[in-house]
Amino acid sequence: MTNIATSTTLDAEQRRLKRARKAALAAFLGGALEYYDFFIYATAASLIFSKIFFPSGDPTVALIASFATFGVAYVARPFGAVLFGHLGDKIGRKSTLVLTLVLMGAATFLIGALPDFKTAGYWAPALLVLLRLMQGLSAGAETAGASALTTEEAPTGRRGFFASFAMSGISFGIVLASLAFLPVAAMNEADRLAWGWRIPFWLSIVVLVVAYLVRRSLEEPEVFEEKHDKGELVKLPFAKMFSTHPAQFLQVALMSFETVTNTFMQSFGLAYAVSVGVDATTMLWVSILGNVIAIATQPLLARVSDSFGRRKVFVTGVLGSGVMIFVYFFVISTANIPMIFLVSTLITAGTYSASNAVYPAWFSELFNVKVRYTGMAIGLQIGILCAGFTPLLGTALVGATKANWGPAAWIVAASSLLAVAGALWAKETSKTPLRELGNHVP
């Protein structure tokens, strides 16, 4: 009997591990698609869109307008968080994540088919904004849903490790996007502006198909299914989350400001580097190197947080990024290519990876399963909403004075301090059993 019981337990553990691995793979691919789309848009907004979607004139004004279309998706993100967070806590994680995936992939593909300003006039930027809003709705719930599902499927003591694969997927997506833009950046300007920029957007369909097939095969986490089968799910997760988890919501909102570092580096940093004479292709290789290494370092750093706690790893990473960003902009202003590679990699694969790898599990763990998707999705979008407009703010403050990079660095540093404040306030959850996470939800 003992052998039978032991065998049954081992079989159950193997099934749980298999489900966790599949969930991590689905999160990885979903993150890859989301940030492939994010980064090709950020790159195009920095290098292309100001020249083809807006009237000719002052290039700085056109760049600010281009970054405004980049930022408008972040306005839609909170609405996507509310809508898809509600669905995720009502009908299930899996179906909701399939829907967000298709919405993101379709919007990205269609951006590649848009007419330019010369062809369609102001319809061109209007349609660009519309499709960008669709991307924002999807992105408002993608990371939160993938993180919640993977956290709920993870084996005991390894929630941080498995949930971090959503972030490694994001790094992979940035690498894919950078590789897709390398041949575009190497084209002559006429071809690049006429048709070359469209190719990376159309290539997103490949990632979409693979991610869709994997995600369709997922199962709902057992902890969610239990509540569903017993009829214990709440009717309005949005309202219930605010009434039962107000502090956790604010903590996540503050900690989500850690995303400003990456957003600033991937969009404003690229445009600033080009403005001081650094080749765009070089900066794409800088991004590729840092994110290739980050694919590996993020799960390792998340595993450290499983052993030593979320707060220690998160705060160390955020403070490191807040300091290193000054070095990053300084070396860009000097156009010192080896130092740009070194400093950018230390941030992307080091300090930023430390905080970025921890938040998928930590943010999820702060909420009860009944409101987890909603709570993480909406809280996360507060900082991300602000992050989306920081490239515009940085461009406006720095202006045409290339040595005036200080305001840009201080924006990132201030955001880092807000994230640290949230982390110091939040509860340490790495050792809390799955079914005891969050506050009681009647």
Image: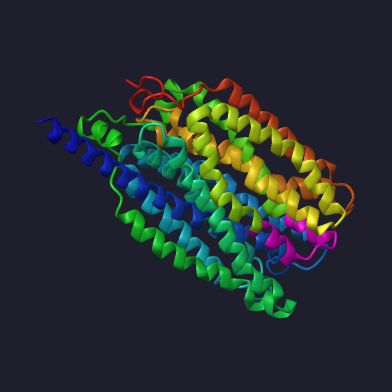
Which quadrant of the figure contains the C terminus? top left
x and y percentages locating residue 189 in the rendered image: 74, 76
139 relative position to 23: left or right: right
Q: Can residue 183 be seen in the rendering of this structure?
A: yes
Residue in the foreground of this view, choosing between 76 and 354 = 354
Q: Residue at x 50, y 45 (%)?
A: 140
Residue shown at 50% from the left, 49% from the top: 139
| Residue 300, position as x, y percentages in the image | 53, 42
- Range drawn in magenta: 269-288
Magenta segment includes 161: no
Whether residue 395 sits left or right of residue 438 in the image: it is right
Question: Based on the displayed image, in which of its 4 quarters is residue 91 positioned?
Answer: top left
Seen in the picture, residue 62 relative to 224 is either above or below; the reply is: below
Q: Image quadrant for the N terminus?
A: top left
Where's residue 368, x and y in %? 38, 27
In the rendered view, tell whether residue 168 sits above or below residue 189. above
**Residue depicted at 63% across the width and 30% down the height:** 315
Visual colour scheme = rainbow
* Whole-percent x, y for residue 80 in the image: 47, 45
Q: Quadrant of residue 253?
A: top right
Residue 144 visible to the viewer:
no
**Relative to residue 120, is residue 433 drawn left or right?**
left
Q: Quadrant of residue 282?
A: bottom right
Name the dominant secondary structure of the magenta segment: helix
Outermost left residue: 1
- Foreground of the two, 195 or 368: 368
Q: How many marks?
A: 0
